[in-house]
Amino acid sequence: MKHLLEFFTTLYALTLFTFKSLYILISDSMKQEAETYKEEREAQKKQGEKRKREDKERRAEDIRGEMMSRKKNVKNEGKKKG
């Protein structure tokens, strides 16, 4: 009877150890995955902000160019009439 009790006690301890080890491995893996995901999201966000800023600057340059060409057209029309 003593050997049977010792067997099941050992089996129980090994099972607990296995489950605890697996839990630690899986939780560490999930933490690393979450950190990687977070870093990727931050990088994408920075790229998106940079792209928005560049687009905004490009649009501002286009608007300035259009305004300058309109001013030239108005001046040229005034010279033609005068």
Image (cartoon, helix red, strand yellow):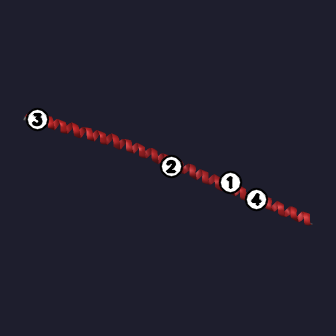
Q: Earlier in the sequence, mark 1 or mark 4?
A: 1
Quadrant of the rendering where the N terminus is positioned: top left
- Which residue, given by chain and number where applicable, does mark 1 sit on? 58
Instruction: Give left or right: position of 52 versus 73.
Output: left
Secondary structure category for the residue under label 1 = helix
Amino acid identity at mark 3: Leu
In this rendering, the count of numbered labels is: 4
Q: Residue at x 85, y 63 (%)?
A: 75
Q: Callout 1: 10 Å neighbours few (<14), some, many (20+)?
A: few
Percent coordinates x, y for residue 22 in the rendering:
30, 40
- Which residue, given by chain and number where applicable, does mark 3 sit on? 4
Residue 42 tag number: 2
> Disc 3 and disc 2: Cα gap in Å?
57 Å
Q: Residue at x 17, y 35 (%)?
A: 10
Percent coordinates x, y for residue 25 in the rendering:
33, 40
Q: Earlier in the sequence, mark 4 or mark 2?
A: 2
Secondary structure category for the residue under label 4 = helix
Amino acid identity at mark 4: Glu
- Which residue, given by chain and number where applicable, does mark 4 sit on? 66
Secondary structure category for the residue under label 2 = helix
Q: Residue at x 50, y 49 (%)?
A: 42
Amino acid identity at mark 1: Arg
Q: 3 above or below 46?
A: above
Q: Earlier in the sequence, mark 3 or mark 2?
A: 3
Q: 34 above or below 67?
A: above
